[in-house]
Amino acid sequence: MKYLSTRDKTLRFCAAEAIQMGLSRDGGLFTPECFPVLGQEEVQALCGMDYRQRTAFVMGKFLDDFSQEELLEFAEFAYSGAKYDHPAAAPLRQVGGRTYCLELWHGPTSAFKDMALQMLPQLLSASLRKTGEQRTACILVATSGDTGKAAMEGFADVPQTKILVFYPEHGVSEIQKIQMVTQEGENVGVCAVEGNFDDAQSGVKRIFSDEAIREELSGRGYFLSSANSINWGRILPQVVYYVSAYCDLLNEGAVKPGEQVNYCVPTGNFGNILACYYARKMGIPVGKLICASNRNDVLTDFIRTGVYDRNRPFHTTMSPSMDILISSNLERLLFDLSGGDDALVRGYMEELGRTGRYEISAEMREKLQELFYGGFCGEEDTKSTIAAVYADGYLIDTHTAVAAKVLEDYRRETGDGRAAVFASTASPYKFCDSVLDAIGETPAADSLDRLDQLQSVSGVETPARLAALRGKAVRFDAVAKKEDMEQVVLRFLR
Ligand SMILES: *Cc1c(COP(=O)(O)O)cnc(C)c1O
């Protein structure tokens, strides 16, 4: 199967090349040329498999340059008991009559990013072998918290790779910072940047587009690559858990074969919900795709009006991983809704770059609204939802609360009674202070003490890897000015 750039369909690559490059050189995102549809019997077969086997099966449909044995080996490593604290990796939990929560945070860093970032390094390593690339891939990451840690955990000590993470000095939570600066592995590096996330992100983009640096690094035996959700190797592993959740519902007798289920996803960069849309394209009976935003409601407006407009205030919220005004992966949806019209997509993206705004055609808007519902949840509602769900016996984090609330709003507004799954994207322990506050506790002064506090209040066990942060040595304390990021990269890749 070939992968095409959303901005120029004549740029076609095999999966290994697409994964290795990350982003197409015209700025477009690699998208599969077609979507294999799972037959009734295949879904039946998937129901009898465990999560690792389901992964190999679903990914194999798209990665025909990888063998089933290879993919199963990757999945067994990525979602092994050593890394995942739940045998099902992505278990489904019933939280109401026809409501289920898909827990995606049982991996090593307690956020859903692990589902993809435990798999991507293996896909990338194998891609290097397949394409005969001799140089070492250096993954550069700018992170607002979750991606950096999950990427390092995935790439730590993976041969022929190095990873360097930049985070805004004061822009991540205490727990996230401790997670990053104590990261182990011979091939990892972490550096704080004086400034905010945008400064770190712009610095990384600048380095990526600096020909002189690329050439210098190539002479030293390195090339730069990306672990952001623009990489196809991050989207594909996420398609699996939506397929898997449907199989679990069938196995439990919660739905009959072919019966539709709505999915509600807390959304930032549009990667996670796009994966759900792709599961639908593969024939999984997904009803409504419910796109949940926090106060940064650019996607809600887009789905309701067909106008994407990033010219609005940026809000810092208690669900920081969704504080985003440009949802990169939306480009892949536009490509699909337009029937693969690369010129149209290129035009929208040019307009977005120039004016911060574009409006899709009426025809595309109709398709969009048929498939998607958009809603948002403010800070007070996030808190009260955590409290309400906790009172019912389930502790959720701030991002998950946004999804739970928007699902509730959707149901009330439409009366849609179909079974529904909402995605839970982080462990409540990752956002301890907001969660403690929401359930009426005053957070302890020290951030690691808050883990114990939440455990003793809620009776829910702290994820072992977070509890283990206490004894860990700080390995990285460098802070760089944003204009010195190039030098940090050049020193790291000596
Ligand atoms: C990254 C992230 C999101 C947003 O996912 P996208 O794929 O960017 O839409 C939601 N919740 C958490 C906890 C995250 O880390």
Image (cartoon, rainbow, N blue to C red):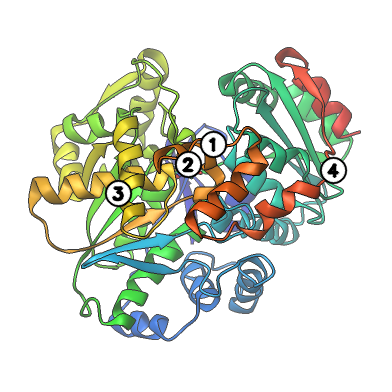
Per the image, the residue denoted by label 4 is 473
Per the image, the residue denoted by label 2 is 436
* Left or right side of 65 for 307: left
Image x and y of residue 341, in percent: 31, 39
* Cβ atoms under marks 2 and 1 closer than 8 Å: yes
Q: CA distance from mark 3 to mark 4?
A: 38 Å
Image x and y of residue 404, in percent: 30, 49
Residue drawn 58% across the image and 77% down it: 68
Q: Label 2 amino acid?
A: Leu
Q: Residue furthest right?
A: 494
Task: Decide: few, some or many residues near mark 2? Use Cα within 10 Å; few <14, some 14-19, many ≥20.
Answer: many
Q: Label 3 amino acid?
A: Ala
Q: Label 4 amino acid?
A: Ala
Per the image, the residue denoted by label 3 is 388
Q: Taking 417 as reference, is 296 above or below it?
A: above
Q: Label 1 amino acid?
A: Pro
* Left or right side of 124 for 184: right
Name the secondary structure under disc 4: loop
Q: CA distance from mark 4 to mark 2?
A: 27 Å
Query: Which of pointers 4 and 2 lies earlier in the amino acid sequence?
Result: 2
Q: CA distance from mark 1 to mark 4?
A: 24 Å
Query: Which of pointers 3 and 4 lies earlier in the amino acid sequence?
Result: 3
Name the secondary structure under disc 2: helix
Q: Is residue 141 visible?
A: yes
Q: Pick whichever, 162 or 322, lies toward us.
A: 322
Image x and y of residue 400, in percent: 39, 48
